Image (spheres, rainbow, N blue to C red):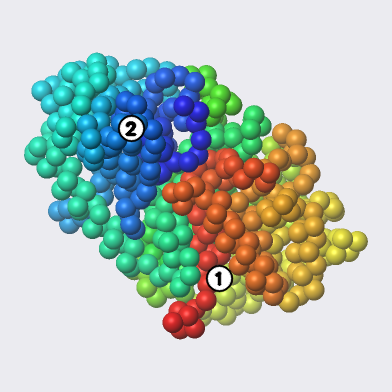
């Protein structure tokens, strides 16, 4: 089977898994999002190994859907003789003993629906990034898989001989498969599985019920919100950029990166989305993660990204044991961007932390202690705003004074002035306002290209990039400022490919980008709304929703010619884009009913 991104995601804020339309587990990292992929065929589909599935004899068709308002996946397989079966897959998540139960594992139910389907159970984990098969031992009702990081146990009421030897058998009654740590179940597999299914369903229905959703596009927003939640690592509050590594941004492009980490730049957009949803617990956990990063920064220097535990070193290397998505390697582990200077991160952290000082719902509001630490970041921003960096697009071969980085540094000082005023620190408010105003004047002069009537990618460089669409949202320009209007027009002319936007149009370390960037298209949607082109914004937004997979998810990139999704999946940026654009564009409830 050729790999594609038509995949459903399950998870429990500890681990996650991706399942294809036939119910095959193709990507599952354990014991957490950035762990060893025991099911890795998404990045190794030329090898018949590294997956778990139920092979249906005489397969004819499949259907897949999420159970309403949950990340519980139902896949129906049909054969050519009228037989059918149903797979139900989920990662348990519910309250137990006063704590959240989110084990390193998942549950699969296999149920006959019609006729007499003949199946073959195949459980083929690998470890050390596809290099080895785990050692297997067998108990009375379970199979152990010993990997280099943990011993896993599959407890089931399926016939073990057929499972181990992968022999076909007729599915006459339901089968439960509980896959997780090497621990004995205290009840029968079916009893455990159904009890966990009921409790997990109840948890997610309650969680969704607490969300603030727009009147329009509710299904899309709810699915995006659930997926964003699945991309969190609850133990620390981190939010990963995506569940995968090394899905190419475009075919055979070499633009293969590991996204299973937490980018500080994402924090502003993520906090914004969580705030709009009213997902305050998730938002506050993420803010705690950011605060811990600040506290550990020592001299105040921030990296662009950190591991989900807050670890700073994410050394990058390619593995030879996985051939890559559709054979398009390399498969990279780690991300060398952590070593780059990306000056916009200081603004991102201050912007996201600003929420703490204004949101009365939070248990731990911002205080003088946090403000003083943010001031250290503000000083870094003020000293770096006009210095070269790799920029938000993480150029590996050059550094320039990027306009977006400069504006984000300005935003750090601007928000510190507001926070100081809220805390009654008038002398600090005056200090930060003066710093911000001076920076604003210089950026307005050096980042502006009068010949194009547009702000540009970097000081003195005529190239454009899509991040300039955020100048109004960041508060640097008003929406009716002629400079913003003409910048939007210039970007539309230079960066639009069909209906979508590329990040930039110049060549980088890998040549000229081929595919469009989904988050940039959502930025364009929002900019159109700001400049008064609301009908166009709504039309483009609704079109972007058609580019989601049938399961309602999106990756990072899109082929503008074919509409095929590329890049790591599911992409947090894209989910945030759906939420923020829907909130901006929806008719209000009071006007719609």
- Horizontally, is 476 left or right of 235 in the view? right
Image location (x, y in percent) of residue 491: 76, 58
In the image, which is nearer the foreground, mark 2 or mark 1?
2
Residue 561 or residue 565, whichever sits in front: 561
Report the residue marked by disc 1: 584
252 shown above or below 243? above
Local packing at callout 1 (Cα closer than 10 Å; few below 14, some 14-19, many 20+) is: some
Q: In this view, does 22 lie above or below 237?
A: above
Q: Residue furthest left?
A: 187
Residue 389 shows up from this direction: yes
Tell me: residue 538, above or below residue 124.
below
Residue 421, placed above or below residue 467? below
Q: Mark on residue 79?
A: 2
Query: Considering depth in this image, is 278 or 390 the residue closer to the camera?
Result: 278
CA separation in Å, label 2 and label 1: 45 Å
Say which quarter of the image contains residue 189. Answer: top left
Q: Where is residue 579 in the image (x, y as percent from the top left)?
A: 50, 62
The residue drawn where x is 34% and y is 63% is 208
Res. 283 mark: none
User: Would you identify the image quadrant in which residue 170 lies?
Assistant: top left
Which x, y percent locates residue 377? 58, 58
- Helix or strand or loop: what does disc 2 sit on? strand
Nearest the eye: 431 or 19? 19
**Residue shown at 52%/59% (left/top)?**
578
């Amino acid at each position: 089977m050729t790999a594609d991104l038509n995949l459903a995601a399950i998870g429990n804020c500890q681990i996650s898994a991706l399942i294809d339309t036939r119910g095959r587990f193709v990507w599952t990292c354990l014991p957490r999002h950035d762990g060893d992929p025991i099911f890795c065929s998404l990045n190794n589909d030329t090898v018949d190994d590294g997956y778990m599935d139920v092979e249906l004899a005489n397969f004819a068709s499949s259907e897949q859907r999420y159970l309403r308002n949950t990340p519980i996946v139902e896949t129906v397989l049909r054969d050519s003789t009228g037989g059918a079966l149903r797979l139900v897959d989920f990662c348990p998540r519910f309250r137990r003993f006063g704590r959240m139960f989110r084990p390193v594992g998942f549950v699969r139910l296999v149920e006959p629906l019609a006729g007499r389907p003949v199946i073959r159970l195949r459980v083929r984990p690998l470890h050390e990034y596809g290099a080895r098969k785990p050692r297997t031992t067998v108990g009375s009702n379970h199979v152990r898989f010993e990997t280099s990081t943990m011993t896993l146990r599959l407890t089931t009421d399926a016939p073990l001989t057929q499972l181990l030897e992968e022999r076909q058998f007729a599915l006459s009654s339901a089968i439960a498969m509980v896959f997780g740590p090497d621990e004995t179940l205290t009840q029968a597999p079916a009893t455990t599985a159904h009890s966990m299914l009921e409790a997990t369903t109840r948890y997610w229905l309650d969680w969704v019920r607490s969300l603030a959703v727009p009147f329009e596009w509710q299904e899309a927003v709810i699915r995006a919100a659930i997926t964003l939640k699945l991309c969190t690592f609850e133990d620390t509050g981190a939010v990963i950029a995506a569940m995968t590594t090394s899905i190419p941004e475009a075919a055979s492009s070499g633009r293969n990166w590991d996204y299973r980490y937490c980018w500080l730049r994402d924090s502003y957009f993520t906090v914004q989305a969580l705030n709009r949803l009213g997902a305050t617990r998730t938002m506050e956990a993420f803010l705690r993660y950011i605060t811990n990063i600040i506290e550990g920064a020592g001299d105040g220097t921030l990296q662009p990204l950190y591991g989900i535990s807050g670890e700073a070193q994410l050394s990058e290397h390619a593995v030879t044991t996985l051939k890559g998505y559709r054979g398009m390697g390399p498969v990279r582990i780690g991300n060398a961007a952590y070593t780059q200077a990306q000056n916009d991160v200081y603004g991102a952290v201050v912007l996201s932390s600003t929420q703490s000082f204004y949101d009365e719902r939070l248990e731990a509001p911002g205080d003088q202690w946090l403000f003083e630490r943010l001031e250290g970041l503000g000083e870094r921003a003020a000293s770096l705003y006009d210095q070269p960096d790799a920029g938000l697009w993480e150029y590996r071969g050059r550094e320039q004074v990027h306009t977006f980085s400069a504006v984000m540094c300005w935003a750090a000082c601007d928000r510190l002035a507001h926070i100081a005023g809220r805390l009654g620190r008038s002398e600090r408010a005056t200090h930060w306002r003066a710093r911000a105003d001076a920076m604003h004047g210089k950026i307005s002069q050096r980042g502006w290209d009068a010949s194009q009537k547009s702000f540009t990618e970097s000081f003195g460089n005529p190239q454009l990039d899509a991040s300039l669409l955020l100048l109004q949202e960041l508060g640097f320009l008003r929406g009716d400022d002629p400079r913003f209007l003409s910048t939007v027009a210039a970007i539309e002319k230079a960066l639009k490919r069909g209906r979508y936007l590329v990040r930039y149009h110049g060549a980088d370390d890998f040549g000229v980008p081929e595919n469009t960037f989904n988050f940039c298209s959502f930025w364009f949607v929002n900019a159109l709304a700001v400049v008064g082109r609301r009908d166009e914004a709504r039309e483009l937004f609704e079109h972007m929703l058609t580019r989601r997979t049938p399961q309602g998810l999106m990756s990072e990139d899109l082929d503008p010619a074919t509409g095929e999704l590329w890049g790591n999946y599911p992409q947090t940026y894209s989910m945030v884009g759906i939420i923020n654009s829907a909130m901006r564009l929806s008719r209000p409830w009071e006007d719609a009913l």
